């Protein structure tokens, strides 16, 4: 379990946050930063930037709460629409093989708020820091185990994107933010659970109750020797319109180049050939070029 934690932030959004803690009393003139790369908003429910205080809040005449009131106030929690769970599939060393896929999957943590997500995310290694044959898995809390046979995963499948080495970090972060930020909400069919299970509540205080199951079951990144593979799992393999919406949303939130090749594979086919990513030889396999 020790291979996935880092002692410092790997997030592009929080990369500059440590500078304030190491500041001294010497005043240094700020240098202009380069213009940020335009990106699609990662969430409908939370922002990845901190808002500044307004002029009214800084006014000395503005009424302010007492110190005792501030101490007694509960910390603000920003709930996500769903509870999500991070899993980690342990790296296999050279010459070793895990006969049962589930034996190598370990649960890292569940989260249902913006704050709990960032507290976990900033201590995870980026994909580029992982050894080959290692997987990160992010799945909805309704998925009991992130495998093909799970009741929520079984009737669905996954979109697969093969990446050249060296570009996975940004795409993986963008994909995770899009999933937990509900960017795939319009892909949902709006149906309720069919296996008799009832939506549960988040595992933290202040979490919003779960609604209907989302179309997206989860997403994974698989670090391999010569490539990195991102996959987005959805619930309905039989609905061509839903699959196309999921594909279009992936294209949009990841800002993929036009030459990107995406493959779709049902979980039923994966169970038949015992492979998540193997495709027929007749299908041309390419890897997403660096944009």
Image (spheres, rainbow, N blue to C red):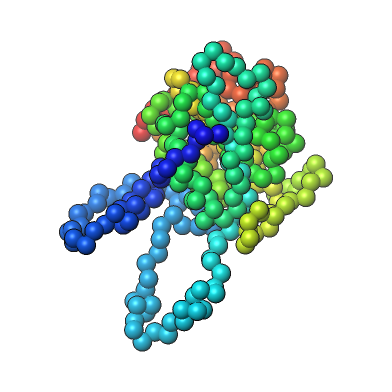
Write down the quadrant of residue 20 in the picture: bottom left
**Res. 63 visible in picture:** yes
Residue 144 position within the rendered picture, expressed as x and y whole percent measured from the top left: 71, 39
Q: Quadrant of the N terminus?
A: top right
Specify whether 139 is left or right of 129. Answer: right
Q: Position of residue 102 (x, y in %)?
A: 67, 28
Residue 210: horizontal and vertical position, in percent?
68, 54
Question: Is there any visible trace of residue 244 in the rendered image?
Answer: no
With 193 as the anchor, is 122 left or right in this view? left
Quick check: 7 above or below 221?
below
- Which is more toward the observer, 210 or 36? 210
| Residue shown at the point (51%, 73%) measured from the top left | 71
Based on the displayed image, in which of its 4 quarters is residue 90 positioned?
Answer: top right
Q: Is residue 148 above or below residue 80?
A: above
Instruction: Give the total of numbered labels.
Output: 0
Of the pair 151 and 88, the residue shown nearer to us:
88
Q: Is residue 125 left or right of residue 90?
A: left
Q: Residue at x 62, y 27 (%)?
A: 104
Residue 221 placement (x, y as % from top left): 52, 32
């Amino acid at each position: 379990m020790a291979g996935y934690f880092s002692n410092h932030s790997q997030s592009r959004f929080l990369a500059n946050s440590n500078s304030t803690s190491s500041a001294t009393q010497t005043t240094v003139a700020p240098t202009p930063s380069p213009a940020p790369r335009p990106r699609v908003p990662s969430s409908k429910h939370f922002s990845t930037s901190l808002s500044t205080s307004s002029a009214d809040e800084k006014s000395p005449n503005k009424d302010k709460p007492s110190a005792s009131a501030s101490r007694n106030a509960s910390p603000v929690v920003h709930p996500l629409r769903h509870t999500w769970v991070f899993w980690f599939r342990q790296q296999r060393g050279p010459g070793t093989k895990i006969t049962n896929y589930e034996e190598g999957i370990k649960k890292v943590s569940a989260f249902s708020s913006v704050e709990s997500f960032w507290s976990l995310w900033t201590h995870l290694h980026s994909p580029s820091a992982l050894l080959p044959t290692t997987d990160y898995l992010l799945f909805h809390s309704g998925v009991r185990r992130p495998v093909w046979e799970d009741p929520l995963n079984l009737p669905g499948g996954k979109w697969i994107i093969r990446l050249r080495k060296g570009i996975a970090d940004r795409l993986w972060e963008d994909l995770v933010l899009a999933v937990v930020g509900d960017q795939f909400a319009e892909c949902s069919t709006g149906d309720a659970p069919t296996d008799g299970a009832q939506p549960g509540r988040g595992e933290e205080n202040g979490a919003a109750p779960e609604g209907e199951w989302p179309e997206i079951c989860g997403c994974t990144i698989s670090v391999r020797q010569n490539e990195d593979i991102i996959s987005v799992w959805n619930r309905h393999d039989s609905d061509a319109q839903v699959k196309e919406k999921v594909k279009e949303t992936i294209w949009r939130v990841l800002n993929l180049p036009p030459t990107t090749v995406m493959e779709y594979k049902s979980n039923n086919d994966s169970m038949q050939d015992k492979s998540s990513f193997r495709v027929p030889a007749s299908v041309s396999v390419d890897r997403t070029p660096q944009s």
